Amino acid sequence: MKISIESNIQEIEEKIKKACERSNRNREEVKLIAVTKTKPVEVIEEAIDLGLYDIGENRVQEIIEKYDDLNTDDLNWHMIGHLQTNKVKYIIDKVHLIHSLDRLSLAKELNKRARKTDRVIDVLIQVNIAKEESKFGLNKDEIWGFIENIEKYPFIAVKGLMVMAPFDEEAENIRYVFKGAKDLFEEIKKKDIDYIEMKHLSMGMTNDFEVAIEEGSNLIRVGTGIFGKRK
Ligand SMILES: *Cc1c(COP(=O)(O)O)cnc(C)c1O
């Protein structure tokens, strides 16, 4: 059966609305990022035609390949995957927001490349709340030192946090991850650090975005729910 992107989006829209209602939030507070990894340009164009202008990719190579084929002016490209330092130069002038800042060597490289293109790059710090060995991201106890160190990089602007929850069939089981990320987000915000801004909280994927919204997410990253299963 052919999947219908349009009806998938409508279904997700419904779920977003309901999750917002349950948590007394406005629908406008939550942005849906269409995660297009492994999907061809024609499929992405369909989503764009349906009004999705925020595109998430997790590999530099795919951004480069798709970037020129899509009408890039209206699009916001989100780099959501692990970013290798030596690949920063290929995407620095293409992406709207990098969700995966997880180490100082990457901050340094981003700063250097952004300086060269004469623009400040917006980034989110990736945190690892569940302390999974297999996941990238800073642990809670590493974050304060990291933030202190980031001050010396004026060409990167920290705009919030990103978290990936461990996969669990039962999204309720990982609510604590989203709660933990939100608490940290608020804690950092309260410090009122002048060189960073806590504006975006990127959390929630196909399997768990409703719980993430209930816990305060304002950027959800949905792939499978829109485009169907990846090969
Ligand atoms: C693939 C991916 C997603 C989307 O996952 P789905 O389960 O397909 O919605 C979200 N965030 C990141 C970082 C990803 O790599």
Image (cartoon, grey):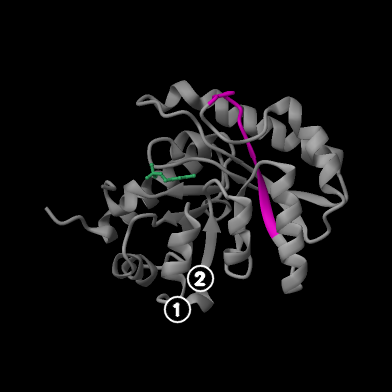
Residue 169, given in percent of the width and then of the height, sits at 35, 26
Element under disc 2:
loop
Q: Residue furthest top?
A: 173
Measuring from the top left, give residue 25's x and y in whole percent. Answer: 57, 44
Local crowd at mark 1 within 10 Å, few (<14), some, or many (≥20)?
A: few
For marks 1 and 2, give the CA distance: 7 Å
Q: Is residue 91 above or below residue 106?
A: below
> Which residue occupies the extreme left position in the image?
1
In the image, what residue type sits under mark 2?
A: Leu
Q: Are marks 1 and 2 in contact (CB under 8 Å)?
A: yes
Taking the spot 49% from the left edge, 42% from the top edge, the residue there is: 21
Determine if residue 120 is in view.
no
- Indicate whether 67 appears above or below 27: below
Q: Is residue 71 above or below residue 230?
A: below
Q: Quadrant of ligand 1?
A: top left
- Find residue 134 and report its horizontal and vertical position in percent: 51, 28
Q: Position of residue 75 (x, y in %)?
A: 50, 70
- Residue assigned mark 1: 71
Q: Is residue 22 visible?
A: yes
> What range is drawn magenta here?
122-133
The numbered mark at residue 14 is none
From the viewer's perspective, tell me whether residue 13 is left or right of residue 89.
left
Q: Is residue 183 above or below residue 86?
A: above
Q: Which mark is residue 75?
A: 2
Amino acid type at circle 1 is: Asn
Q: Residue at x 70, y 37 (%)?
A: 185
Q: How many marks?
A: 2
Under circle 1, the secondary element is loop
Residue at point 69%, 49% (across, down): 106
Q: Is mark 2 within 8 Å of ligand 1?
A: no
